[in-house]
């Protein structure tokens, strides 16, 4: 929208990881140096941790361009996998072909060992990078530890990089993973940008996007951005993108503190489902917490005093949960309505039937006679929700509805910036914050996609109008292809990257599921 106005060739603040946009702040440079040191010195295990949106995935992609041609790489971006699936992905990533399909894990490992020994004998190295490693199960992590046993008398044949959020450190610290944790010799915790890095970060992205220096952020704008983002690159991208949109509407080329403030206000005006949404300040919540703790102590004292009635009291406690009315959503730091004297917000929890009906109704798709409507479900990491352009529903995590066992959903009408517009049980729209979405996302997300029975799979070598459409969408998402309408080698490789990034079978074929995901991400 604003790219041509400002003279950009692409959006400078896309949330899609792109190695071209990595800004080597002191923290990011140190992280990259740790990675290169661990790989080149064959240290075996390397762990990189950091908060959401600090640039870990972009760092992984950048790492590849710093490795020499003799280093073979395998990247795993979908961490919700079994140990057998992990081995299959590793062989595919390294390009290892077997004479026949492997029927056991030992056969996969033998094939991998043969490849690694051959690679080592030719002077090569091998790197396995696993992103979002905090989601790996103990079984998969144990399998990864066993892979480190593939070594010669002096050298590790494969270097394994685990990249994840802070939960990864806690996961590795569990007693059952002690052996794996002790093998990690190179570690780095990726911190957010410092205040004096903000200017360089923003100007770097403007230049990479093709900027000619026409757009300028003021000193006050940089300070305001840092105050809001605390140096988190993803937050910086979100507020800068919104600020450029506001400046475009004003036909302004100088991004002032006032424009940035308006962009931030746009985010904060959304309805965040936390104590502030209910009209509670942090201080009030803390005060209420103290009162509730004191009330809890009083209850304990009464309970001890009434020990003679313990049988009746125990019965009351055991049946109390069953006697509760239907549960409303469990919000973080929720305060009982009778204490706050505030009405509880309308429920955002929808059952299967209501959410499905709402999804089809909100999708508002005009069908031709040849079209069919299909409900497509995917496992997506929660941070990708900002890339979804059409209505969708999210399976809610169990913690959100702890008193209910049947599946329940959150219906999202649209995403605005990093916030979203949800549809409640009364078919009314409510704004919800990014934090709310991330907290309750359970990876299962679905939407409606119109397709035709005769739709062909798009494959390498084909020429078709649908190929040109897919190429256009890929470019908009940050995957670099030439829009020729011909399915060439370049497009094949980028489609495989797209499929890998979003947990699809990375075969380079644009089938129905790949099309459905591209459809959802297209403007």
Image (spheres, rainbow, N blue to C red):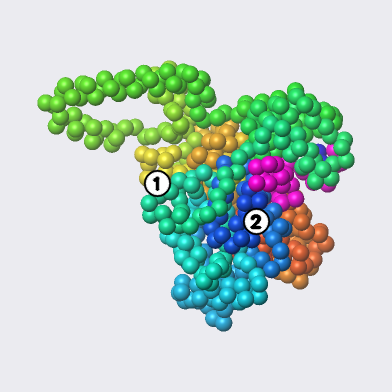
Q: Position of residue 389 (x, y in %)?
A: 66, 45
**Residue underneath mark 2:** 36
- The part of the chain drawn in magenta is 4-30
Please tell me whether residue 315 belongs to the stretch shown in magenta: no
Nearer the observer, disc 1 or disc 2?
2
The residue drawn where x is 47% and y is 62% is 145
Picture quadrant where residue 65 is located: bottom right
Q: How many marks on residues?
A: 2
Q: Say if mark 1 contacts mark 2, CB within 8 Å.
A: no
The residue drawn where x is 32% and y is 19% is 294
Q: Residue placed farthest to the left in the image?
A: 308
Q: Is residue 414 visible?
A: no
Along the line of sight, the residue nearer the viewer: 192 or 266: 192
Q: Left or right of 81: which side holds 454?
A: right
Where disc 2 sits, the SS reads: helix
**Residue underneath mark 1:** 406
Q: Position of residue 214 (x, y in %)?
A: 87, 35
Please tell me whether residue 5 belongs to the stretch shown in magenta: yes
């Amino acid at each position: 929208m604003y790219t041509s106005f400002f003279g950009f060739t692409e959006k400078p603040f896309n949330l899609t990881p792109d190695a071209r946009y990595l800004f080597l702040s002191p923290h990011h440079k140190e992280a990259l140096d740790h990675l290169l040191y661990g790989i080149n010195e064959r240290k075996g295990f390397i762990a990189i941790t950091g908060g959401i949106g600090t640039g870990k995935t972009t760092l992984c992609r950048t790492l590849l361009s710093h490795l020499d041609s003799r280093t073979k790489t395998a990247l795993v971006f979908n961490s919700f996998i079994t140990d057998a699936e992990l081995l299959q992905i590793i062989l595919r990533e390294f390009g290892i072909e077997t004479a026949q399909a492997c029927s056991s894990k030992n056969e996969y490992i033998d094939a991998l060992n043969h490849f690694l020994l051959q690679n080592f004998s030719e002077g090569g190295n091998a790197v396995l990078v696993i992103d979002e490693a905090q989601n790996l199960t103990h079984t998969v992590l144990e399998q990864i530890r066993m892979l480190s046993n593939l070594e010669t008398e002096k050298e590790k044949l494969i270097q394994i990089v685990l990249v994840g959020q802070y939960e990864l450190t806690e996961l590795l610290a569990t007693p059952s993973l002690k052996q794996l944790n002790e093998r990690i010799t190179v570690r780095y915790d990726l911190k957010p940008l410092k205040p004096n890095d903000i200017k360089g970060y923003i100007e770097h992205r403007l230049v990479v996007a093709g900027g000619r220096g026409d757009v300028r952020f003021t000193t006050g704008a940089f300070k305001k951005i840092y105050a809001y983002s605390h140096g988190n690159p993803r937050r910086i991208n979100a507020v800068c993108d919104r600020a450029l949109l506001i400046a475009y509407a004003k036909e302004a080329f100088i991004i002032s503190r006032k424009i940035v403030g308006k962009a931030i206000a746009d985010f904060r005006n959304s309805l965040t489902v936390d104590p502030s949404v209910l009209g509670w300040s942090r201080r009030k919540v803390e005060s209420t917490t103290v009162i509730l703790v004191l009330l809890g102590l009083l209850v304990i004292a009464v309970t001890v005093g009434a020990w003679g009635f313990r049988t009746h009291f125990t019965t009351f406690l055991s049946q109390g949960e069953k006697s509760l009315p239907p549960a409303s959503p469990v919000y973080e730091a929720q305060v009982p309505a009778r204490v706050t004297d505030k009405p509880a917000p309308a429920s955002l929890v929808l059952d299967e039937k209501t959410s499905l009906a709402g999804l089809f109704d909100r999708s508002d798709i005009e069908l031709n006679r040849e079209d069919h409507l299909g409900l497509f479900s995917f496992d997506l990491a929660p941070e990708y929700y900002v890339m979804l352009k059409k209505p969708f529903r999210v399976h809610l995590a169990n913690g959100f509805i702890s008193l209910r066992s049947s599946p329940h959903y959150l219906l999202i009408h649209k995403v605005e910036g990093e916030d979203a517009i949800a549809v409640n049980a009364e078919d009314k729209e409510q704004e919800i914050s990014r934090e709310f979405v991330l907290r309750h996302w359970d990876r299962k997300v679905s939407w409606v996609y119109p397709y035709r029975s005769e739709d062909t799979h798009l494959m390498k070598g084909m020429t078709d109008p649908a190929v040109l459409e897919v190429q256009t969408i890929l470019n908009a998402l940050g995957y670099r292809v030439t829009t020729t309408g011909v399915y060439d080698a370049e497009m094949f490789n980028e489609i495989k990257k797209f499929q890998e990034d979003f947990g699809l079978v990375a075969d380079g074929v644009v089938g129905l599921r790949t099309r459905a995901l591209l459809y959802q991400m297209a403007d």
